[in-house]
């Protein structure tokens, strides 16, 4: 049964941002979702050039990333491109995980 779950998860995560996440040895949906949330919170965009490229592709006007940073309590003096890109990326991953949550739960039932 474990292989079936892993195969289903692999198929579900195919062509998503979670394609390369590890999910072996997880017994239930709650633990998997929690592990994925932890991985998302640890995911960072580092290096100025990568951050600028990410922002240019995903939020060229910086409206979304600045809005998210403001909601998290950051002041303008505290932000830089790496922080904005990280916040934006983590938000996008969190939204993507939310869209997969019901499917993950269904696999473990």
Image: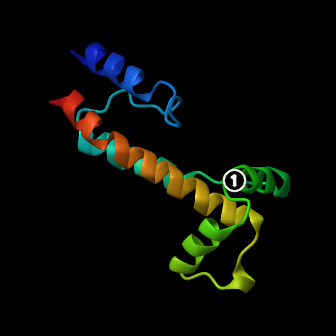
- Secondary structure beneath label 1: loop
Snapshot quadrant of residue 83: bottom right
Question: What residue does disc 1 label?
Answer: 45
Above or below, 30 relative to 70 = above
Percent position (x, y) of residue 48?
A: 83, 58
Snapshot quadrant of residue 7: top left
**49 vs 95, nearest the viewer:** 95
Q: What's the residue at 55%, 71% (across, down)?
A: 68
> In which quadrant is the N terminus drawn?
top left
Q: Is residue 59 left or right of residue 56?
A: left
Q: What's the residue at 60%, 59% (across, down)?
A: 88
Residue 38 can be seen in this image: no
Snapshot quadrant of residue 63: bottom right
Q: What's the residue at 69%, 67% (across, down)?
A: 62
Residue 73 can be seen in this image: yes
Q: Work out which residue is located at the far front of the displayed protein and give it.
A: 61
Above or below, 50 relative to 80 = above
Q: Is residue 55 left or right of residue 100?
A: right
> In which quadrant is the C terminus drawn?
top left
Q: Is residue 86 left or right of residue 30?
A: right
Q: Is residue 108 left or right of residue 34?
A: left
Above or below, 64 relative to 34 = below
């Amino acid at each position: 049964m474990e292989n079936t779950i892993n195969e289903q998860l692999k198929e579900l995560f195919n062509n998503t941002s979670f394609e390369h996440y590890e999910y072996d040895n997880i017994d239930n949906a709650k633990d998997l979702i929690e592990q994925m949330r932890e991985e998302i919170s640890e995911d960072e965009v580092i290096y100025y050039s990568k951050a600028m490229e990410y922002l240019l592709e995903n939020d060229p006007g910086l409206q979304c990333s600045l809005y998210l940073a403001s909601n998290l309590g950051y002041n303008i003096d505290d932000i830089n491109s790496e922080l904005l890109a990280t916040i934006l990326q983590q938000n996008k991953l969190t939204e993507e995980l939310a869209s997969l949550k019901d499917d993950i739960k269904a696999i473990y039932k």
